[in-house]
Image: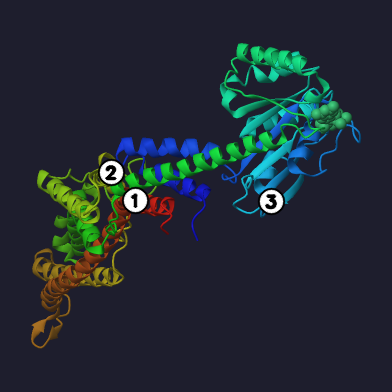
Amino acid sequence: MKRGLTERIDALSRAVVAAEGRADPEVVAAAHQVVTRAGERVRFDGEYTVVALAGSTGSGKSSLFNAVTGTELAETAVRRPTTARAMGVAWGTALPHELLDWLDIPRRHLIAASAEDPLAKLVLLDLPDHDSTELSHQLAVDRLVDRVDALVWVVDPQKYADAVLHERYLRPLAPYAELMLVLLNQSDRLAPEDLDRCVTDLRRLLDREGLRKTPVMITSALRGLGIPELRAMLARTVAAKQASVRRLQTDVEVAAERLATDLGNVRAGRLDRRAQDGLTAALAEAAGVPTVVDGVFRAWVKRGRAATGWPFLSWIGRLRPDPLKRLRLELPAGTAEVGRTSLPQATPVQQARVEGALRGLTDAVAAGLPNRWAAAIGEAARGNQARLPARLDTAIAATELRTRQGSWWWGLFLVLQWVLVAAVLIGGLWHLYNWLGPQYLLPRLPEVLWQGTPAPTWLLGGGVLAGLVLALLGRLFVRVGAGRRARAAEKSLRAAIAAVTAEQVLEPVQAELDRYATAVKAVAEARGRS
Ligand SMILES: Nc1nc2c(ncn2[C@@H]2O[C@H](COP(=O)(O)OP(=O)(O)O)[C@@H](O)[C@H]2O)c(=O)[nH]1
Ligand SMILES: [Mg+2]
């Protein structure tokens, strides 16, 4: 089915919104103009021509309405003094309800007419009298005068110079002179020479008001004079409207065509995983993820060694600063400092890699797109570049590294190490006592031997040896644990970086791609091609 003009104008309007700032500005402006012009003209059932009969009470509007339509639909003065509410008939195969609703015409009738009928698609309205004493009638007239395609002012020989008609309606409507027609009705009431004088006078009045282009016609609803001419005039108005609609249709087509050419019809590239991952990796590098991962490893090793090492030596390691604390990571949540790490700024090489990844990503998706769209995509990708380092840093600071609590077995090793320390101390003191005791005449302790070696020697030597072996074992386990923690931290950090990348770079780029797709689709609809 061929799309209606209204829908196509709608589609063109959507295309204009999407292409604004991306497509050729001149082409967009031209399309925008068409949308505005056409939109006003064909808001509702654009192919219909709406003509209203307006004028003062008793001039013969309703009688003319009946004469033109060949009906008795309008109530003339005999039956009712004034027409309270507007009434309308439409020539065609169906009533344009939407249009009549918009015009606020509740009383509506259809006059069957084929498409070939010169009056097909004409809506003729019988307006309430403009000089009605009821304000609501006047307001209804004012409202309709704004919304119709053409106005037929009906005057009679007595009241054609009516001040209200001229001051309030005709003069202000001078810009629309071409869309108006004045009927001097009840011509049968005047003698031919009086009629001439009356017409001349009316013409002079209209000319003075700037209505030179408004024709004057003479009619008599009573006698049927001038009715065929009036119908012919209406038919011409319908034809003109049809022509203007056709013209608009062409305008819409031309504008859509130009916009389509400007847009091209590229299947915009999609953001593929590889490019995204490349960018995330480059940003992770620049934001210092490897430094943090290394810090996690070293901090874990340091803490693990402090906990499980040989107590006689492990205190030395405790004197060295903690790698994570130095980076201002792992600060307790809620501290003012959270969100600002001491990670170093990206190096020029890292920045260049980010730039390369960004370019790779945008080049891939913008391939084949018109230059302005490609530029817009580049801008979308870089729009948040200035705030990116801070965002990435915050993301890193907020990532849970799970390093605050050591492994469960550290405690066990610690207890064992202190038991061994106790053995070493006991053995040592025992030996000291045995050596110094006799000099101070202290009582001798009983000699305990095991496998031919004294017990204090076992305690001292075994304690030292076992402590060192345990420490070595601890080192090994700690290293394995540190590797595992570092990998887990890397995964969490990369996920955090990926989330920031998506929000700050990928989403704006996707939005631009969607915008292009919207424009292409809308333009196709405007051309009636979907
Ligand atoms: N003599 C004469 N009387 C007419 C003519 N047209 C309408 N009338 C009469 O003028 C009166 C008012 O007509 P009507 O159509 O109701 O006017 P409206 O108030 O403008 O709708 C009625 O009595 C009609 O019969 C006409 O051309 N000649
Ligand atoms: Mg009337």
Q: Residue furthest right?
A: 79
The residue at which mark 2 appears reads as 376
Does 501 sit left or right of 147 as displayed?
left
Q: Residues within 10 Å of mark 2 (few under 14, many from 20)?
A: some
The residues bearing labels 1 and 3 have C-alpha atoms spaced at a distance of 39 Å
| Inter-mark Cα distance, 2 to 1 | 10 Å
Colour logic: rainbow
Q: Secondary structure at mark 1?
A: helix
Question: x%, y% of residue 116?
Answer: 59, 51
- Can you tell which mark lies on residue 516? 1
- The residue at 79%/17% (across/down) is 159
Residue 333, disc: none
Q: Which residue is mark 3?
A: 95
Instruction: Depth check: give the residue in front, 201 or 87.
Output: 201
Q: Position of residue 236 (x, y in %)?
A: 58, 37
* Between discs 1 and 3, the one toward the N terminus: 3
Judge left or right: residue 320 versus residue 61.
Answer: left
User: Which tag, 2 or 1, sits closer to the chain's start?
Assistant: 2
Tell me the amino acid under the disc marked 1.
Tyr
Q: Is residue 205 above or below residue 103?
A: above
Confirm whether residue 330 shows in the render.
no
